Amino acid sequence: MHFKIDENLPIEITELLAKAGYDAKTVNDQQLQGSKDPILINICKSEKRVLVTLDTDFSDIRAYPPEEFSGIIVLRVKIQAKHHVIKVFQNIIPLINRESLVNHLWIVEETKVRIRGKDD
């Protein structure tokens, strides 16, 4: 599975995914910093990458229907301190192999993950 880590997340998220055996690139890797949301999500779509972001705009299923994308993970955390965001993300890595990401939106909070989208 391939991931694109938004510029609003710590680089350690990329490292966690790589350690778990996934291909992860950052927005910065491709000099996409500051790209408008529709441009970024369409690049993820063309590259078949799951977008991982703190940007809650991506949780709007009318603007970004999950079934059109390889997956979107929105971290909706109360504390955006680096160590806290990393810890919350670390907790969902085991779910990646168990739950579908393709054509799904995951909204990740400290104590739960809500999954929306169409199953195959």
Image: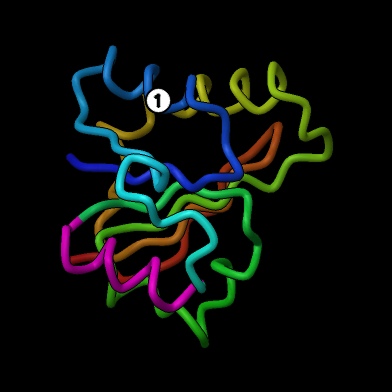
Which of the 4 quarters of the picture holds residue 45?
bottom left
In the image, farthest residue toward the front: 31
Which of the 4 quarters of the picture holds residue 60?
bottom right
Residue drawn at (62%, 49%) of the image = 54
Colouring chosen for the image of the structure: rainbow
Q: Position of residue 71 (x, y in %)?
A: 33, 58
Q: Which residue is mark 1?
A: 93
Residue drawn at (37%, 18%) of the image = 15
Callout 1, which amino acid?
Ile
What is the span of residues highlighted in magenta in the rendered image?
A: 37-48
Q: Quadrant of the N terminus?
A: top left
Q: Position of residue 37 (x, y in %)?
A: 50, 72
In the image, farthest residue toward the top: 19
41 or 60: nearer the eye?
Answer: 41
- Is 80 positioned to the left or the right of 88 in the image? right
65 or 116: nearer the eye?
Answer: 65
